[in-house]
Image (tube, grey):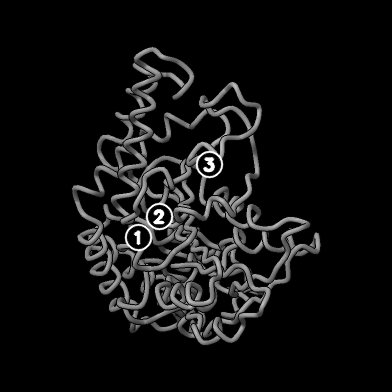
Amino acid sequence: MDNAATSFPKPPGVLEAMSRYAAELGASAGRGAYREALETGAMIAECRRRLARLFNATSPENFVFTLNCTDGLNLAIKGLFDGERRGHVICSDIDHNSVLRPLNALADRGWISVSRLPIDRTSGLLDPDDVRNAIRPDTRLIVVTHVSNVTGTVQPVREIGRIARERGITYLVDAAQAVGHMPIDVQADLIDLMAAPGHKGLLGPLGTGFLYVRPGLEKLLYTTREGGTGSVSEHDRQPDFMPDRFEAGSHNAIGIAGLCESLGWIARQTVEKLAAHERRLTAAFLEELRNIDGLHLYGPASPDSRGSVFSITIDGYSAAELSAVLEMEFGILTRPGIHCAPRVHQTLGTLQRGGTTRFSFGPFLETDDVRFAADALRQIARARQHVHTA
């Protein structure tokens, strides 16, 4: 139950696709005219097409493959600013360190100023009016975390996207905990840039991810690395066309082979059905947790307002102790700690106590599994109460 860190298990066929690449292809796309290299290139192109269909993008070439979501966020943030192109950025306390640290690095250089907006302590929501009111004449970027990796809060990305588009401000969405878990339409949601990993909700392997760049915006985004692309090799400057402009060096072809297969599995299942399944799991878990004495759940109490990520504490246990008991006594795998999101825990009041214990669901869990987990929490809470009353 730690799918927010990386999903497991993967769909049938993912490992087979990676094994087939390793055993039969083993080539670098664009680095040869032989069949294996061409077939690798075709597979990478198909993976882009599947991403474009999943997110309703107009062009597959506007998906840049990255090492992970953090890599994509760094490209998006650092590609917009430098010593000459300075400006103001709006983010919020719900953000992950993958947003906060690149922004702080640029602020430390004096290139940007940052407004970090508060979130509601109970719901974890960012108020769109706060975003609107924080805009300044020099605001050049608004960053929103679609789904919190701590509270599961789903932010109003479309409403905030409308604000950004009306004011002509670039809009970046960190979709690490949203992709694969719920429908996303980059056109309807007015998203300019969207970063996501391949190994979480998209059910692919580690070492995969992407940055979506709205058509035309690539002209405003500087490269953060340059190198070989297998295209226009007669020129010693980086190509200016997509996606080669941002894809220097050989691809992680074996990882993309697995991601391509997992995207095919998601397309066959449909993201709408996967989202409905997770809502059922979420509703069952929330119902079971409702009457456990000494248990505290952080984030929205309604399955309609959250993803399937849950932060929990139980009186008398540290986050690490609770995770250890869940694993040793019940075989349940969770993640304790700060979850690379210190400002969220500061808002929740859990930072000084070592954070929370996080449960996060995926498509291969069933209702009986989440009820088993809730019963384990009930037993743990009851046992600690007996200790205190003995």
Q: Nearer the viewer, residue 58 or 1?
A: 58
Please give the residue where the numbered disc 1 appears in the rendered image: 361
> Could you tell me the amino acid type at mark 1?
Phe
The quarter of the image holding the N terminus is: bottom left
Please give the residue where the numbered disc 2 appears in the rendered image: 3
Of labels 3 and 1, earlier in sequence is 3
Q: Nearer the viewer, residue 166 or 348?
A: 166
Tag 3 secondary structure: loop
Residue 168 position, x and y percent, is 53, 71
Disc 2/disc 3 C-alpha distance (Å): 18 Å
Residue under the image location 40 percent in, 84 percent down: 293
Q: Nearer the viewer, mark 3 or mark 1?
A: 3
Residue 16 position, x and y percent, is 29, 29
Q: Is residue 5 in view from this perspective?
A: no
> Could you tell me the amino acid type at mark 2?
Asn
Tag 1 secondary structure: loop
Q: Which mark is residue 67?
A: 3
Indicate left or right for 80 with 32 as reference. right
